[in-house]
Amino acid sequence: MKYLGIDLGGINVAAAVVDEAGTILSRGKIATPRTGAEAVAAAMAEAARQALTAGGFTMDDIESVGIGSPGVIDPKNGVVEYWSNLDFHNVPLAEMLKARLGKEVYIENDANAAALGEYAAGAGKGSQSMVAITLGTGVGGGAVLDGKLYTGFNYAGLEVGHFVIEYNGRLCTCGRRGCFETYASATAIIKRARERMQDNRETLLWKLCDGDPEKVEARTVFDAAAQGDLLAKELVEEYQSYLACGITSLINVFQPEVFCVGGGVAGAGETLMGPVRAIVDREDYARDSKRRTILTLAQLGNDAGIIGAALLPLFR
Ligand code: BGC
């Protein structure tokens, strides 16, 4: 049995053909258009076709399609009720893709899909409770408690990117100030790097981006820090402090058995997580408990969302 998984991100639409064990067989990828829902649905169909072609498959080989989309998702009606980043309001994305691909389409919040993926086949396997966050264009969150995805009564739960960690802090796309994702997303570290580079001509970041700040990615900052660049080290440390602050607060709320960190920025691995773990370990309110939350990187890496999305019908 093969499934198509689509991870709709703020930058790219990634698609993959996935088997029932969660193994990715082939992939497709296309930039996310910022010109409205129709264009996004067309891009998703295109990425899906790329994935099929890359693996030598046709739509007939596919059981169903699953989308992981940012925002508040009504999975029953297949609707993106709200996504601040692309200003989506009540977009029937599942139906729009079904019309293009001619298959049953399931949809779930992208971070919920990642949490399901990690729970089924990654870091959360066999745990009593797991919270997963994803660090990408935004910051997403999902929780599997006693084997069940917790979404809140209206599917809008676990929007961890939008809990405030700095009162009156940086402006978020949702309209509030100080949201976790304005400090802990890939977008946040990139924006901060671009700002700080302006009055720091010596930083290695200029060399790594060929003199074009638009080319700076989260990875660029981690690479420069690894090479000893002072500004980059400062940016990484600042990022880690905010990330650890948010994670500790979430652990204090949920005390999950496993807390898993995924998304693009988590690709920095232990370089990112080592210092974060040290802060969380010190600050977690349950520091004296015999049993402590395991804070770990997503085992499926940045693929957790796409695998979870593909396998959505198996979780229903
Ligand atoms: C959105 C979430 C999403 C996360 C990751 C946030 O900005 O509000 O719904 O899960 O980004 O994409």
Image (cartoon, rainbow, N blue to C red):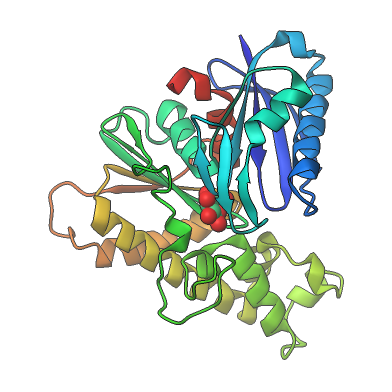
Locate residue 153, reporting x and y percent: 34, 42
Q: Is residue 138 visible?
A: yes
Furthest-bottom residue in view?
A: 199
Q: Look at 24% across and 50% down and name the residue there.
A: 255
Q: Nearer the viewer, residue 80 or 196?
A: 80
- Which part of the image, by quadrant, shows the N terminus? top right
Locate residue 80, reporting x and y percent: 58, 43
Locate residue 87, reporting x and y percent: 65, 57
Q: How many marks?
A: 0
Q: Look at 45% across and 32% down and name the residue there.
A: 116
Classify 288 as above or below 55. below
Q: Look at 50% across and 73% down and name the residue there.
A: 237
Taking 91 as reference, is 315 left or right? Answer: left
Q: Quadrant of residue 315?
A: top left
- Which part of the image, by quadrant, shows the C terminus? top left
Q: Nearer the viewer, residue 247 or 220?
A: 247
Q: Look at 34% across and 67% down and name the residue there.
A: 279
Classify 266 as above or below 179. above
Q: Quadrant of residue 110?
A: top right
Q: Nearer the viewer, residue 85 or 54?
A: 85
Classify 236 as above or below 42. below
Taking 191 as reference, is 36 left or right? Answer: right
Q: Is residue 226 visible?
A: no
Q: Nearer the viewer, residue 126 or 110?
A: 110
Taking 215 as reference, is 103 left or right? Answer: left
Locate residue 132, reporting x and y percent: 42, 45
